């Protein structure tokens, strides 16, 4: 993965500031602040219902934030005049439930965004799609429909579909939570490869080993608030908050 | 003259078929033409109304856009309720004679038939399409949005093809209903199958015989349509198996392979193979 922006490590790609989200009276996110730099792999951990997924969905504008700002290259994407579709094309998302288009083949899933959104010529789009499908080990299955392949395979295709758009940031919303244990490995393997190549990623996950070993930054959330964040070594070996300790002991003790 | 006419059932059927077979065929042709066009145009109306009804409105939209959308939806709701809630026979006479007396528009047989059947079908299809769109998992929409598709692109390339597949049985229902219900258009003088049969029957007072023929012709038309629609459904579903792209060096098989081997056999997991490939 070639990303020109990697050279400038001080350049913040994404800045979330004072972000809050409420569904009616139910406040899910409170005053969230964090930054993402090019090449960062940020893992967001925390118990179910802590607001991790909502945070990710806000970043991709699948949920409209109640207040606060999300700055992409310094520009507030929650502003009224922003073209949401154009922004989303630059920020890829991989879902827990894959969300592959069931009316298209594996290959077509990876082509359609390029031709319709990026207006790439079909031949280029096809070659590009094949490149990324090959990368996730799914190129033999290009003619299959999503319903014909396994969960792990679907998720790898979903990653290829997101990569084919050549996004600046890739968001993962619990990418392995819907998979059988035996298929978790193949998806994490692909994600490890991406991280090693310098892809900027925000990963909401329950895979603590992945968060500890692969990410450059870990964010721990509880009750819609970021309780603690820092380098994985610090969070996992010497967490400063009792809540973090308690959460990790429950997860790592298994 | 009269003494030459047959007096038994089969004799009369034979007589009608030899002397009025052409008329019955023409009537059947007109019936199927009206039903097909009415259903097709009705589907298009239904799709358009269905799209408008499912356009998402967010707080970010400006108030003129929201006001316009509100107004358009109100009008469409009235349209759907009125045309679903009144009999087509009454609608036909209302529109046909209303246009003639007060707008001085004399619709021809075809125009009137197409118009009335289309807007009537459209009203039913609007709700069907809306249901079809709602039946598509929200994940499909989110997946499309996440790669930067606009609402229109999401609808056109992702939601619609799937919604269409789901509502084909309902389109089939509408087509069959239209083949039969176009018979009420005889009240505005559309010379379709029932009109033809009725005229013929009236000429000889052979109602049972003429209607026997009409029954069979209607049944042949509807049965053919329902079979064709089933075939179309199967075609849209695509093949149950797929070819591994064996030209690719990563593929393990040589020659063409089909997965799954048969429709009954469940697909075999490939994660083990993947693991054996080692890291790449």
Image (cartoon, rainbow, N blue to C red):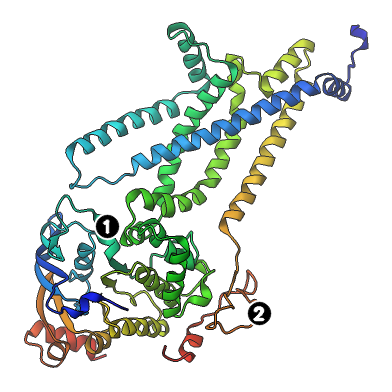
Q: Is residue A236 left or right of residue B124?
A: left
Q: Tell me if label 2 and label 1 are in contact, CB under 8 Å.
A: no
Count neighbours of disc 1 (C-alpha within 10 A) and say few if under 14, some if 14 to 19, many if 20 or more: some
Q: Chain of mark 1?
A: A
* Secondary structure category for the residue under label 1: helix
Whole-percent x, y for residue B136 in the image: 41, 54
**Which quadrant of the figure contains the N terminus of chain A?**
bottom left
Q: Secondary structure at mark 2?
A: loop
Mark on residue B255?
Answer: 2
Which percent across, then down, holds residue B117? 53, 27
Do callouts 2 and 1 point to residues on the same chain?
no
Q: Chain of mark 2?
A: B
Q: Is residue B225 left or right of residue B1?
A: left
User: Eyeballing the image, is B83 above or below A95?
Assistant: above
Res A86 label: 1
Q: Residue at x 28, y 73 (%)?
A: A172
Query: Which quadrant holds the C terminus of chain A?
Result: bottom left
Within-10-Å neighbours for mark 2: few <14, some 14–19, many 20+: few
Q: Residue at x 67, y 46 (%)?
A: B227
Q: Is B53 positioned to the left or the right of B13 in the image?
A: left
The image quarter containing residue A67 is: bottom left
Q: Residue furthest right?
A: B4
Percent x, y of residue A69? 11, 61
């Amino acid at each position: 993965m070639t990303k020109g922006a990697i050279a400038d490590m001080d350049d913040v790609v994404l800045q979330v500031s004072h972000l809050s989200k409420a569904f009616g009276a139910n406040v899910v996110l409170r005053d969230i602040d964090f930054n993402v730099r090019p090449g960062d792999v940020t893992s967001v951990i925390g118990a179910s219902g802590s607001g991790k997924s909502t945070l990710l969905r806000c970043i991709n504008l699948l949920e409209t934030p109640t207040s606060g700002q999300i700055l992409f290259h310094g520009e507030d994407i929650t502003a009224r005049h922003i073209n949401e579709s154009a922004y989303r094309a630059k920020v890829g998302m991989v879902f827990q439930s894959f969300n592959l288009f069931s009316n298209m083949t594996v290959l077509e899933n990876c082509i359609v965004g390029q031709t319709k959104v990026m207006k790439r010529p079909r031949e280029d789009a096809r070659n590009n799609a094949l490149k990324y499908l090959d990368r996730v080990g799914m190129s033999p299955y290009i003619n299959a429909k999503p319903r014909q392949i396994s969960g792990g395979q679907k998720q790898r295709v979903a990653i290829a579909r997101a990569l084919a758009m050549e996004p600046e940031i890739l968001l993962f919303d619990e990418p392995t939570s819907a998979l059988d244990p035996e298929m978790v490995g193949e998806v994490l393997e692909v994600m490890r490869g991406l991280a090693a190549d310098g892809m900027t990623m925000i990963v909401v996950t329950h895979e603590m080993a992945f968060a500890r070993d692969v990410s450059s930054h870990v964010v721990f959330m509880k009750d819609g608030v970021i309780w603690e964040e820092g380098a994985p070594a610090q969070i996992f070996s010497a967490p400063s908050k009792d809540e973090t300790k308690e959460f990790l002991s429950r997860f790592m003790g298994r | 003259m009269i003494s030459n006419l047959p007096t038994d059932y089969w004799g009369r059927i034979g007589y009608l078929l030899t002397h009025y077979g052409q008329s019955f065929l023409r009537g059947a042709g007109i019936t199927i033409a009206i039903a097909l066009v009415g259903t097709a145009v009705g589907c298009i109306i239904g799709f358009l109304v269905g799209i408008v009804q499912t356009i998402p409105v967010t707080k970010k939209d400006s108030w003129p856009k929201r006001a316009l959308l509100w107004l358009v939806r109100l009008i469409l709701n009235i349209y759907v309720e009125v045309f679903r809630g009144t009999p087509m026979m009454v609608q036909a006479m209302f529109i046909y004679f209303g246009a003639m007396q007060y707008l001085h528009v004399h619709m021809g047989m075809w125009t009137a038939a197409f118009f009335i059947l289309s807007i009537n079908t459209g009203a039913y299809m609007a709700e069907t399409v809306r249901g079809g769109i709602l039946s598509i998992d929200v994940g499909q929409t989110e997946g499309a949005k996440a790669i930067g598709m606009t609402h229109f692109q999401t609808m056109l390339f992702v939601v619609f093809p799937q919604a269409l597949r789901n509502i084909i049985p309902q389109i089939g229902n509408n087509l069959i209903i239209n083949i039969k219900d176009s018979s009420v258009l005889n009240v505005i003088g559309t010379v379709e199958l029932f009109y033809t049969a009725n005229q013929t029957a009236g000429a000889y007072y052979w109602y049972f015989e003429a209607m026997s023929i009409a029954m069979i012709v209607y049944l042949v038309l509807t049965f053919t349509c329902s079979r064709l629609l089933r075939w179309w459904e199967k075609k849209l579903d695509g093949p149950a198996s797929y070819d591994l792209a064996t030209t690719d060096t990563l593929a393990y098989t040589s020659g063409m392979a089909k997965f799954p081997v048969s429709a009954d056999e469940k697909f075999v997991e490939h994660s083990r193979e993947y693991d054996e490939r080692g890291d790449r």
